[in-house]
Image (spheres, rainbow, N blue to C red):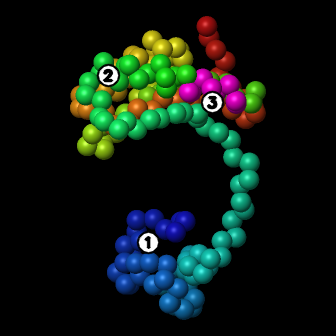
Amino acid sequence: LHGVGRVTAEKLKRMGIHTCADLRSWRRLDLVRDFGSFGERLWGLAHGVDERLVQVESRRQSVSVENTYERDLPDLAACLECLPELLEQLAGRMARLDSGYRPGKPFVKLKFHDFTQTTLEQSGAGLELEDYSDLLAGAFARGKRPVRLIGVGVRLIDLRSGFEQLRLF
């Protein structure tokens, strides 16, 4: 539930409350007694009441594409062979972005055969095949294991936010 941190979760667990169904079985007054004003909020959330405003206009923070491979890619060379197709898909997605965004940092995500994953991004790097190849090599070096998934993307700079770091070069 929104707002329940580690300490409150531990207290709920000690009280035998593990699910929202458990929480719904408690009286509102008892929750207020044990949790103060937050007990009122817990009761409401457990009963489907959430008075927070809905954010209807969220801004995109990145654009990316990824592919999970039917067979794990055994080495860096095999991963690098997949990069041009992924970058072509990424370019297509970026072309559909509105003018309110500017590309920022490129990133590469790898998920290894054992489902561990790593993401590498670099400020100031370009958005060309060579730049993504360098990022991919750096990310692969962290695991040096067969790769199940490759993702490529770019963090976006929201030009409507009012503040923007200007380019130096």
Mark 2 vs mark 3: which is more N-terminal?
A: 2
x, y (%) of residue 139?
A: 34, 27
Image point (27%, 39%), residue name: 113
Reading the image, the residue beneath label 2 is 78
At 52% from the left and 14% from the top, the residue drawn is 128
Q: Amino acid at mark 1?
A: Thr
Distance Cα–Cα, label 2 vs label 1: 47 Å
Residue 24 lies in the magenta-colored region: no
Q: Which mark is residue 93?
A: 3
Q: Name the mark nearer the viewer: 2 or 3.
A: 2
Q: Secondary structure at mark 2?
A: helix
Residue at the limit of the structure toward the front, as seen here: 70
Tag 2 and tag 1, C-beta contact below 8 Å = no
Mark 3 element type = helix
Label 2 vs label 1, nearer the camera: 2
What is the x, y in percent for residue 12?
41, 78
Give the number of callouts: 3
137 displayed left or right of 107: left
Amino acid carrying mark 2 in the image: Ala
Q: Is residue 138 visible?
A: no
Residue 118's quadrant in the figure? top left
Give the amino acid type for the residue marked by disc 3 in the picture: Arg
Give residue 72's position: percent from left, percent from top.
Answer: 29, 34
Magenta stretch, residue numbers: 89-97
Q: Nearer the viewer, residue 118 or 14?
A: 118
Residue at position x 71%, y 55% in the image: 55
Q: Is residue 101 above or below residue 20?
A: above
Find numbered disc 1 in the image and state the secondary structure of the residue it sits on: helix
Residue indicated by mark 1: 8
Query: 6 or 76: nearer the eye?
Result: 76
